[in-house]
Structure formats: structure tokens, C-alpha cells
Image (spheres, helix red, strand yellow):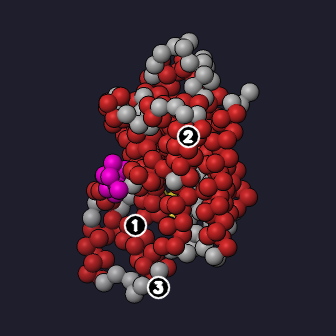
Amino acid sequence: MLPPRVGSFLALAFGISWAIAGVGALLGIDANSGTSYIVLAALCMFGPAIAAIVQHRYLDRAPWTGLGLDPGAIRWPYLFASAFLGVCLVPLTFLAIHMVGDVLGVPAFGHVSITGERFNVALVELSAAMGGDGIPSQANQWIASLPGGLILGVLLVSGLFGAFSFNLPFMLGEELGWRGYLYQALEGWSGARRILFTGTVWGLWHAPLIIMGHNYPGHPAQGIFLMVLFCVLLAFLFDWARTRTKSVWAPSVLHGVINGTASAAVLFAWDGDVRFGSPVGAAGFIAITLLAAVLMLLDRPYRQVLFHPKGAVQP
């Protein structure tokens, strides 16, 4: 049975974010609207946090500690491990694209090449798509000469830095709801049940933005289904981060790393269908599953948490 307070929290979280998205839709904003869409999506991210605060503090009248915000409770080694998980996602996605797209020849996965030449081509294509005049030939030659691994490394480190700084408030906007309030409200459930429910809710919450073209442009209906599947898989990593650090800050950082590095995919991968050859498609699903399998293999206490309610085992 779903606790009534969870129902009211979800009504608030969905109501706030979907109302913001609805206003944006009425104004004609979609995923191709540039800055206005970025602002709209950022505002939507605060819906779960507002709902968590209203529900937890003013309706449940519970102390702040229940939301996992106390920095003093953070288990720092696990927080850094959570950030590392996020950094691994794009490289593992590239590996999946290479194995399925390049080696096995499945066209929907496209191709990947981590080289300066490919990075240069991607920059030229992006410049042309935005109506630019391209990149000067001298700069082209210099960019093409750079080691692809170095470029990817810089992009991943930049995403990591952003996750601990300017991206953090926006990621906390979502995570204070999903891994803050909802996590503690469902603590009596087994980890697997909590992950399945939270991931499904989290994915459906994205529906208005998916319809606007977010993540799966041209595939609104399939996109919602794929987003739910993506979020259920990701929810395993996020639940592990929340459980192991005893803090909402770790999933917030993990969320920030993933959001901050996912765009690197368009710079080294090409010709794939977004539903397959991307971090939010089948290649990304493979990458997340690999990371989850490693955690399952290495972390026996958390493995037990997955199939037992709170109190049966302590991670």
C-alpha cells in the first residue's frame, strides 16, 4: 500500500513541474527553442524539491534531517565513488556503440571514434547547424591534431567540476524530491521495490519535456517509455549512492556528472538513432547495466538491501 503522504508529495511534484511545462508549451517553447527551453527545463527541475519541502516540513511536520541534507552525515568515500560512476557512463556508452554499431554492424547504433579528427568534424557540423560560418581552417587543423582521449578527458573533468559547483543546485532540485523525500518515505520497502517505483515515477515526471522533444526528438510516445526505462535503470545507481552515503548530496552529484558529460556523445558518436546509439538509448542502457552489475558484484551488503526491507540488513 502506498503511504498517503507519498501520494500528496507526487501530486505536488508533478503539479508544479507540469504546470511550468504547460505554460511553456502554451508560449510555443519546445526543445529547439534555445535559451528559453533551457530556462523552462531548469525551472521544472525545482518542482520535486519544492514539493519535498512543503510535504516534509509543512504537511508531515518532520525535521530537516529526514531529507538527507546534513553534510556531516556524508560518507565521503562513497560520494566520490558515486561521482566516478557518473564519469564512467559516457565511456561505457561509447564502448557499447563501438561493439554493437562498429563491430557487429547494427546500423541503429551508429559509429564512434574518439579522435581529434572526429571532434573537429562534429564542431563544424554543430557550427553549421547553428547558422555559423564554420571554423577557420587553421583552427580545424589544430583541433584535428589533438588526441581524442585528451579531449574526452577534459570534457569529463569539466562535467565533474560542474557537478560539484554550478550544476549542483539544479540537480538538488530533482534529487531532494526523488532521493530525499521519496527515499525516506519508502525506506521500509526493499531496495528493488523502491528503485522500481521511484524510477518509474521519475521517468513519467519527464513526460511533458519528452513530448517537447527532450532526449528523443521525433519520438514522443516511444520517448516516454524509453525515459521510464532509462530512469529505472539509473535509479539503481542513484539509490546505491543515497544508501551508501546516507545523503542526498551524492545522487545530486551523480546526476550532475551524468547531465554534464552526456553531451560529449554528440562529439564522438554519429549516424546512430537516438533510441539506440546514445546515453539515453540502448547503448546507455547497456552502460548503466554494466555499472550496476559491478556494484552488485562488489557490494554484498547493498545486494542484501535490494531484497529486504529496512532493518533486515544494514549497509
The N terminus is located in which quarter?
A: top right
Cα–Cα span, label 1 and label 3? 20 Å
Range covered by the magenta-colored residues: 155-166
Residues at marks 2 and 3 touching, judged by CB atoms closer than 8 Å: no
**Disc number placed over residue 58 in the picture, else none:** 2
Q: Earlier in the sequence, mark 2 or mark 1?
A: 2
**Disc number placed over residue 118 in the picture, else none:** 1
Q: From the viewer's perspective, is residue 49 above or below residue 307?
A: below
Q: Which amino acid does the dot numbered 2 rest on?
A: Tyr
Q: Residue at 68% across / 47% down in the picture?
A: 11
Cα–Cα span, label 2 and label 1? 53 Å
- Determine the secondary structure under disc 2: helix
Asked if the magenta segment contains residue 13, the reply would be: no
Q: Residue at 35% across / 56% down in the picture?
A: 166
Name the residue beneath numbered marker 3.
131
Q: Residue at 52% across / 61% down in the picture?
A: 43
Residues at marks 2 and 1 touching, judged by CB atoms closer than 8 Å: no
Q: Which amino acid does the dot numbered 3 rest on?
A: Gly
**Disc number placed over residue 95 in the picture, else none:** none
Q: From the viewer's perspective, is residue 230 above or below residue 195?
A: below
Cα–Cα span, label 2 and label 3? 50 Å
